[in-house]
């Protein structure tokens, strides 16, 4: 049985991924939220405090990590 090129293209195009655009938008949202979190705590995002970071900053960092991990799932999620 011989499969034609248009049939192969249709088969491969039947599923799509959210892709880099959705991933980029998700990461932008995460960055905006973590900047607001840092600002509300009275700090600047990106300034390293190391082991002396207050609990509010640790919470912001933790939330940012969860958000970024969720974005990784968005990158692979199929779209209709």
Image (cartoon, rainbow, N blue to C red):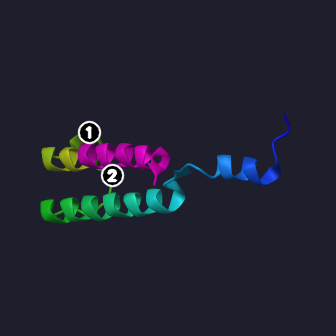
Query: Residue 30 magenta-drawn?
Result: no
Residue in the foreground of this view, choosing between 78 and 23: 78
Neighbourhood count class around disc 1 (C-alpha, 10 Å): few under 14, some 14–19, many 20 upward:
few
Q: Is residue 79 above or below residue 58?
A: below
- As drawn, which residue projects farthest toward the right? 2
Which image quarter is the N terminus in? top right
Residue at the disc numbered 1: 51
**Magenta part of the protein: which range?**
61-80
Between residue 53 and residue 17, name the one nearer to us: 17
Residue occupying the point 31% across, 49% down: 67
- 43 horizontally vs 65: left or right: left
Q: Which mark is residue 48?
A: 2
Give me the residue at 14% from left, 44% from top. Answer: 55
Residue at 66% x, 47% y is 12
Alpha-carbon span between mark 1 and mark 2: 9 Å
Asked if residue 60 lies left or right of residue 1, the reply is left
Query: Which mark is on residue 1?
Result: none
Of 22 and 3, nearer the camera is 3
**Res. 20 in view:** yes
């Amino acid at each position: 049985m011989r499969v034609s090129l248009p049939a192969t293209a249709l088969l491969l195009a039947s599923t799509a991924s959210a892709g880099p655009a959705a991933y980029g938008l998700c990461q932008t949202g995460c960055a905006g939220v973590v900047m607001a979190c840092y600002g509300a705590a009275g700090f600047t995002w990106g300034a390293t405090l190391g082991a002396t970071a207050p609990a509010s900053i640790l919470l912001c960092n933790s939330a940012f990590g969860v958000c970024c991990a969720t974005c990784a799932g968005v990158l692979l999620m199929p779209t209709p």
